[in-house]
Structures are given as structure tokens and as C-alpha cells.
Amino acid sequence: MQAPSEDDVARQESLKRRAEAHAQWKRNFFQSRPPPPFIPKCRRRRSRERIAGAPVHLLHRRALELVSAEAARASSPPPPPQAATTEVTEPRSKSDAWRERMLLEVERRDPYTDINIRTDPRRTVVVSSLHPKSLEEDIRLFGEQFGRVVSVRLICDRDGRSRRYGFVQFGLEAEARKAVANSRKRRLHGRAVVMEMERGRLEPGFLPKRLAEARRQAAGSASASSAKRQRVEGRGVASAPAAVARGGASAATADTRDEVDAFLDDIMNLT
């Protein structure tokens, strides 16, 4: 058997040293932390709960007071019922509430100072009769059929639902007039869209349909109430001369009866 050479022995010793060095490195690198110090369990004494925070004789005294008060209340006569002094307010109808809300909106409305309106009125078009699910992007795509759209604004209520109308500003005034002239020929979500030039900032005193309708109803109700009051007053003035005439006629009839009675008495005395 051939003996290993010096190179083989040196190589094996080198591998053995490397293995031992690697094992020592692993032991040093993955050395675990020292265990935490031992803490004994804390034993707390349970404190006895006090009964309602007071001695028993105080509770007994309070119970006797309640029983005596209940007996005195049962023996005393009941108080007389008080008349209700609260005025019963008549419930308002939905139409009156809507009219009042619209009139408040008319008072607050000022298109010249509204910070949300920043468009040119001569290049702005009002888009109405929209589908409830139509979005601003849909309105923009619809308006780009007639020209360059600068801005789109869809009007929504307080709950975020669409009011089915909005405003579209075009790049040129001619494009806005073209959209107004040809809007009836196109449809958006299956509906014929109505496009008109903005009139809120061009015509002083202009109101949308719902606000104008609320103001007309309020004026009609006010005129009707004044006419009814005038009719009642006229009826009272006309009834006064009639009462005077009836009083005069009754007085004349009484005088005639007295004269007839006196005449009959004279005839009886002659016989």
C-alpha cells in the first residue's frame, strides 16, 4: 500500500483546520442570548367589597323612608289635570316646504359672486335633461362632438345625486352656438339632451325653472289671500246698509200696527 505523500497530508490538515474554524465561527455567530432574569409571581390580596359603600343600618333607614313616602303619596288626592297650553302646529305640506326651501335658495342665489362659477358666460352652454347616471366625463365626450371643451361641471344635490343638468364651456363662442343648434340630433345614454346658452349672467333677474315656479306659486298664494280678504271686507261693508234698511222697515211696520190698534179702539168706543 502506497503511503500518502506530504502534499496529501498537508491538504487534509488544511481542510481539517478550515472545518474547525468554520464550526467555531458558527458557534460564535449563532450564540443565543442569556435567559431573562427570573421574576417571582406577584400574589395580591383580594380586598373585600363593601356593601354599597355604607353600613347596613343606613340602608335599612333609607328603605323605611322610601316606604313611608310611597304610603303618603298613595293617601294624598291626585293633583288636578293641567290644561295643555302647548299650541298644536299644523303640519306643513310637502309643497309648502318645497316652496319655502326654493325661496331661501332664491335669496342666497347670486351667480356673479359664486366662487364655483369661473367660466365665460358667452362660451358656456347649459346641458339639461341628462340621464341620472351621466357623469362629467360622459358630458365632456358628448360636447367634444361640437368643438373643444374647456371645462365641464355637473350639478349635484347635497346627497351627491345628479340634478340632471350641468355646464359646459367651449373654446370658442361659435362652437357653443353650434352645440346649441345641433344638440337635438344627438343622444346621450338614450336621451335627447337639451343644450341652451347660459342666461344666468347675461340676463339680469333670470331664474331657473324650479326657482321661478316657486316664486310664481308664492306670488299666487299671496294674491289669493289678499283677494279673499278684500272679498270678506266688502261683504261686511255691504251687509251694514242692508241691516240698517231691515231695521227701518221693522220700525215702519211697528208704527203701522200701532195706528191700526188705535183706530179699532176708537170704533169700539163709538158703539
Image (cartoon, grey):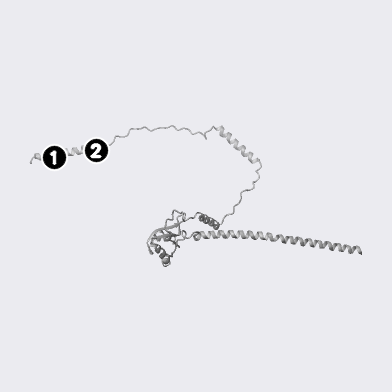
At horizontal 67% and vertical 61% (from top left) the residue drawn is 235
Q: Earlier in the sequence, mark 1 or mark 2?
A: 1
- Quarter of the figure with the N terminus: top left
In the image, 80: left or right of 265? left
Q: Amino acid at mark 2?
A: Phe
The 10 Å Cα crowd at callout 2, few under 14, some 14 to 19, many 20 or more, is: few
Question: What is the residue that sits farthest to the bottom in this orientation?
Answer: 185
Tell me: residue 91, above or below residue 256. above
Measure the alpha-carbon separation of dots 1 and 2.
Answer: 26 Å
Q: How far from the left and from the top, in percent, is residue 108?
A: 50, 54
Residue 77 placed where, x, y %?
Answer: 66, 42
Q: Residues within 10 Å of mark 1 (few under 14, many from 20)?
A: few
6 and 179: which is toward the camera: 179
Tell me: 235 left or right of 23: right
The amino acid beneath tag 1 is Gln
Q: Quadrant where the C terminus lies?
A: bottom right
From this viewpoint, which residue is outermost toward the right? Answer: 271
Q: Give coordinates of residue 66: x percent, y percent.
A: 59, 37
Question: Label 1: which residue?
Answer: 12
User: 103 or 9, which is in the foreground?
Assistant: 103
> What SS does tag 2 mark?
helix
Dot 2 corresponds to which residue?
A: 29
Q: Name the element at disc 1.
A: helix
Quick one: 33 or 221, which is closer to the camera?
Answer: 221
Query: Measuring 68% from the left and 59% from the top, which residue is drawn there?
Result: 237
Q: Position of residue 71 (x, y in %)?
A: 63, 39
